[in-house]
Amino acid sequence: MKPVSIIIPAHNAAETIRTTLASLVTERAVIREVVLVDDGSTDGTAIAARQCAESLDLPLTVVESDCRDPGGARNVGLDAVDGDWIYFLDADDDHVEGGLRRLFEVASSEPGTDIVIGGYRRIVDGTDFTDKRPRKFTGDPVRNAGDYVAGLHRTVAVGSVLVRAGLIEQTRFPCGLHFDEDTVFCLQLFLRGRIATSPAVTMVYRLRTERAARRFMVDPHRRFDDWRTKLRSLGTKGLPELAIARREGMVALKIARVHYAAGDIETAHAFISLALARPHSLRNRVRVWRYAAKIAARKRGVTESRRV
């Protein structure tokens, strides 16, 4: 029996889903099922996916949902699959030929493996960046989770990870978070699982900076608090407090940078103050200080112009 179930959350992805599904054709030898969670689409995503899968002879099942949340849609998919291994891919990403088979080969060759992390190619606003390949993880799950959340490991893309279904069990993506929900999910698995890595590039991850920045623009204080509460809850499961504090500082810096670029100096100042109060690696500490200086200078300029 083929071992891998693939979950693809999709919302209005009719223009991209054909390419995504076509990129999986070479992996049919290990694909048990492809579950597309059509999350409230209005553009015919499900129809396009069914037509494409039929022409490619892919074992596709479409599940309808109305989560309007990528984490929630992935959870719907988790409830619908029955493969021994789970692989996630977004509806605008592409799989790289042979990548999934390579992940499964690593899982099969290293007994006791729960998670296999591969590399991925990052395309930002249409520009190729250097491929991201995982660094070596240790045999200590708590250390792996702590080092990852603290930024000591390269970011893991959802589509570059193969996970044993038995490890996931009832673990689910957090719903209602507007950023870093993938990290929270992965950390829950890292804290319990044995990790192996593969240098092979598994998928192509496309990022639009405007879309990414938009997550931090709406109600940033509430969204940050919601995310921080969820992250801190992992402390009860063994995630080190220092690692959590470092992650808070990293995300606060991201939000400060986005609002600084948008000219919202008050919000930028509030979040850079949060970042300054958190521990950082030397590299990130320099970034925080640099942005703190820029924001302080801009803030002084705004204050002086108001006086005039």
Image (tube, rainbow, N blue to C red):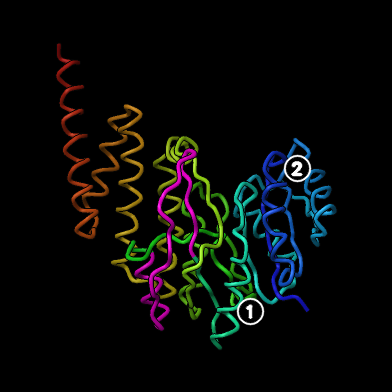
Seen at 78% across and 48% down, the residue is 49
Q: Earlier in the sequence, mark 1 or mark 2?
A: 2
Residue 253: image location, x then y, percent: 30, 46
On the image, which quarter does residue 100 sit in? bottom right
Q: Amino acid at mark 1?
A: Gly
- Please give the residue where the numbered disc 2 appears in the rendered image: 45
In the image, is residue 155 above or below residue 144? above
Q: Helix, strand, or loop for circle 1? A: helix
Q: Name the residue nearer the viewer: 57 or 220.
A: 57
Residue 36: image location, x then y, percent: 73, 54
Residue 235: image location, x then y, percent: 39, 69
Q: Name the residue nearer the viewer: 63 or 27.
A: 27
Q: Residues within 10 Å of mark 2 (few under 14, many from 20)?
A: many
Q: Helix, strand, or loop for circle 2? A: helix
Please state, as top left, top right, bottom left or bottom right, where the C terminus lies in the image: top left
In the image, is residue 186 above or below residue 298? below
On the image, which quarter does residue 28 sit in? bottom right
- Of circles 1 and 2, the one toward us is 2
Q: Amino acid at mark 2?
A: Thr
- Please give the residue where the numbered disc 1 appears in the rendered image: 166
In-image side of 115 versus 231 (left or right)? right
Count of labels in the image? 2
In-image side of 68 versus 127 (left or right)? right
Q: Are marks 1 and 2 in contact (CB under 8 Å)?
A: no
Instruction: Give the Cα distance between marks 1 and 2.
Output: 31 Å
In the image, is residue 15 above or below residue 67? above
Q: Name the residue nearer the viewer: 183 or 207.
A: 207
Q: Residues within 10 Å of mark 1 (few under 14, many from 20)?
A: few
Seen at 22% across and 55% down, the residue is 283
Q: Which residues are magenta?
A: 119-148
